[in-house]
Image: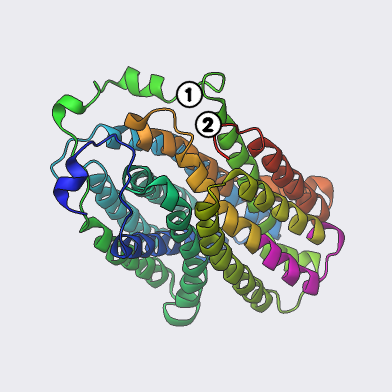
Amino acid sequence: MTQTDTVVAVFAEPTRRVTSRWIAAFATAWLGIWMAQLTPVQLLLPAQIDRQLHPENWVDSVVAFGIISGIAGVCALVAYPVTGALSDRTTSRFGRRRPWIAGGAVLFAVALLLLGVQESLVGIGVFWSLALIGFCVLTAALTATISDQVPVGQRGFVSGWLSAPQAVGTILGLLLVTMLFTGQLAGYAVVAILLVVLVVPFLLLPDAVLRGDQREPMTLRGIIASLWISPREHPDFGWTLLSRVLVNFGNAFGTTLLLYFLMFGLNDANAEDDLIILTLIYMVFVILSSILLGRLSDKLGRRKAFVFVASGLQGVAALMLAFIPELTVAMVAAGILGLGYGCFLSVDQALATQVLPDPAARGKDLGIMNIATAVPQAIAPLLGALAVAALGGFQGLFILAGVFAFAGALAVARVRSVR
């Protein structure tokens, strides 16, 4: 795809298939992004909070982690759609999306480096919030390139390469910071450096340039007003957004406290080792289902049925953990959860690009969709810990996860414009 090709018809629906080089650079960028975002969430950030807090029990630690994540989640609530709206209107000669991808990556990386030297809970909260803002700026622009450049018939497969690196990035990041870069600052530094290095190849690809006369007037009031998308006028966008919120809450409830479930729910003496095993099982199924089922949805021209079944599978996995709390069952549930979530990540992303109300506001509208992924992950640890405390154990938490997943399946069934 040449620069001339990308400049023509900025808002037109893309028809030319993206190349394998484009997909490889896209997947590489997401590998760096997920490693930089999920390694702190899974290990670095909770451990850093523990060292500052010295909690008497694990609930105190999770609540503190949840509060910090929740504050960062509020930042994401604003950063995603605002960044998307600004990138929609960017007239840089480097393109609409590339300046925001580059700027978001730099902010994300610098914030992680500064986070690594924090010695107070306030400092941790401030710089994790800045890191998440950088993550939102970067990913809001990067996901918009799917709608900008990838034809509908290729979006399931391409979205799979957004999803599969999430599982690889999680396990690779954990291995790096537990085996090679074991210090607090070293752990944050390695994922920050890899983030920048792995995003660079995508920045070398062409991006459509928006002319000044094509840009909508940009005012603060106009941007704020554009953030509201009426579910009455655009019901399919509303149902897709609701489904994404529900399913991501269900998945986050089922995964963010898994280590504590092994330690205190199963009294597992080898909880950390078994968590790695469960993560590996989950990873394999996420990778396979996101790529293979994403491509299958392209070939069949169907999205809704895949998302419905994927949501239901996550509900089944959660209920297995709720009613049969055994390690072997947890391994089976990890596979089912990975199968469902991998399919959901890729096909739901493709579905989301097909229900956007306005081709001139793809970045902003996908930014709103991305809120439904980032915010549940940010506040689920706090809500999950409160649920465990209020319901007297992990069974209630996993039942809650299942209910949310099944509700997400019912919501996506209401979509009408996409098969």
Give the vertical position of 257 relative to 382 (above or below): below
Give the numbered dot on residue 8.
Answer: none
Please provide the residue range marked out in magenta.
321-337
| Residue drawn at point x = 36 percent, y = 37 percent | 363
Q: Quadrant of the N terminus?
A: bottom left
Task: Specify whether 174 is left or right of 92.
Answer: right
175 up-or-down from 323: above or below: below
Q: Are marks 2 and 1 in contact (CB under 8 Å)?
A: yes
Measuring 27% from the left and 59% from the top, which residue is drawn there?
A: 202
Q: Nearer the viewer, mark 2 or mark 1?
A: 2
Look at the picture and state if 294 lies above or below 148.
below
Residue 397, given in percent of the width and then of the height, sits at 76, 51
SS for callout 1: loop
Numbered badge on residue 237: 2
Q: Circle 1 sits on which residue?
A: 229
**Pointer 2 or 1: first along the chain:** 1
Task: Give how far across and how far down residue 139 sits, in percent.
Answer: 38, 49
Q: Is residue 105 left or right of residue 248?
A: left
Amino acid type, label 1: Ile
Residue 333 horizontal/vertical position (percent): 74, 65
- Mark pair 2, 1: CA separation: 8 Å
Closer to the camera in the image, 366 or 328: 366
